Image (tube, helix red, strand yellow):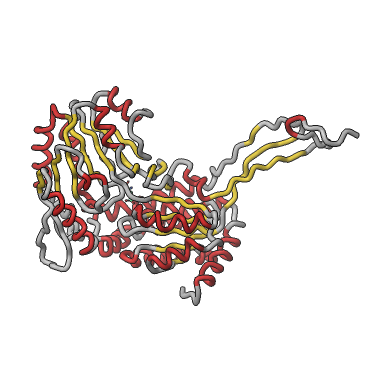
Amino acid sequence: MKFNSHDELVNTSKEAQKKWRLIPAPKRGEIIREFGNELRNQKADLARVITKEARKIVSEAEGEVQEAIDMCDFATGLSRQLYGLTMPSERPDHRLQELWQPLGIVGCITAFNFPMAVFAWNFCLASVCGNSIIWKPSPHATGCADAIKKIWDKVAGDHKELVLILNGGNEEAIALCKNSNIPLISATGSTQMGKELAPLVSARLGRTLLELGGNNAAIVCSTADLDLTVKGVTFSAAGTTGQRCTTLRRAFVHADIYEEFMEKLYAYYATLKIGDPSDATSQLGPLISEKSFNDMQNVLISLKEKDVKIHGGQRFEVSDPKEFYVMPAIVEVDKVEDEMLAETFAPILYVKKFTELKDAIHMQNNVKQGLSSSIFTNDFRESELFLSSEGSDCGIANVNIGTSGAEIGGAFGGEKETGGGRESGSDAWKNYMRRVTATVNYGKDLPLAQGVEFDES
Ligand code: UN1
């Protein structure tokens, strides 16, 4: 569908939403179930599009489509559970209750690394709640958006325009953010992007739902099961070639097991299969672009000036020289280096020794981002401390699991410069609705709240 202007696009979405919101939520849920079934039918083909564009390995690409399918199932169930509370009224013959109504249009900006799943997080909730969506996919993954749109159009009947795609870059994102007909902008990407876009939305007092950078850490305690830990750390740090917002970037390892852990970690890294992501045996595909490669190399160059031990990180030669495959890097540091405080969207894992858990927790939290975190331990006192108010300050805190690979059932998102948004499961749907507090008087008198008297007669 082609639009002559931005206004035309937004008006089309508005009209689509007006029609859609009249459909009872459980009926909307049925259409989303159809959408999910079609994703199921085409899972392998969709995964191939992800692999082609985002360069994810087959298993992860299929996992991403599964994440979208899971969201459809979740939203279908949710379609009968958009509950509002009823509170006791202090006045006789009155009912006090909350109603949840759709917002209107949701503007959704997604990144290259989860080109289908993050759309599904937003679309499934937004649509079951009665909203339409204008989706600006990453310029790296427009084919993924087209494939999804085609499936929606197949199942949507009269509601094809509920999903509209706006292709483009920064300029298009800015236009969405400035448009006061779009009550909610949900954006995934870098913190820098969030800092540019969010003020445009808040200048018109619109709402944002932000899922921005991460700088995730794992704490490996002395009682940890090291074989399990090494697998968890490697999947999170090197998997997806370090290009998840949940990627593990820093590991704090207890001094008592440091040598043994590092030995096992290097041995495991040495087994990783780097290569064409469409080859089912590959575990790591290439970086998304030459720019990502350069960003990674620049960080490694600046680290070389310092007293650190760097392992890996160099370009890995495969048959197609146009792509940027890399050996995932491990950087052992004695002190917290500045490079560790920034997110480099590439597989660089910093490792530092600790002796006191509270110091490790402090180092973990002492960054600007607050998305995901892990502790590996078999001592419940350590894991409970980590999960307490003295522990991780992130939106996601895992025990004996790496920082990446969250299920859809929980709310996903993080604190501080990660943006504070929550998407996906739990009650994240509330972000896509407006809450109406309704008080109904079904009596014959007009008692006022707080005992106020106005009309004495
Ligand atoms: C992202 O990288 O933007 O928890 C999302 C995970 C995935 C989602 C990552 N389920 O790693």
Check the image and name the residue furthest to the front. 305
Residue 378, image x, y percentages: 23, 26
Q: Is residue 126 left or right of residue 42?
A: right
Residue shown at 19% from the left, 31% from the top:
354
In the picture, residue 195 is in which quadrant? bottom left
Check the image and name the residue furthest to the bottom. 4
Q: Is residue 208 left or right of residue 95?
A: left
Nearest the eye: 217 or 383: 217
Residue shown at 37% from the left, 67% from the top:
169
Q: Is residue 172 left or right of residue 304?
A: right
Residue 434, image x, y percentages: 58, 48
Residue shown at 57% from the left, 64% from the top:
14
In the rendered view, tell whether residue 379 sits above or below residue 38.
above
Residue 398, image x, y percentages: 31, 36
Nearest the eye: 277 or 6: 6
Q: How many marks?
A: 0
The C terminus lies in which quarter of the figure?
A: top right
Residue 323, image x, y percentages: 17, 65
Nearest the eye: 272 or 103: 103
Residue shown at 46% from the left, 57% from the top:
34
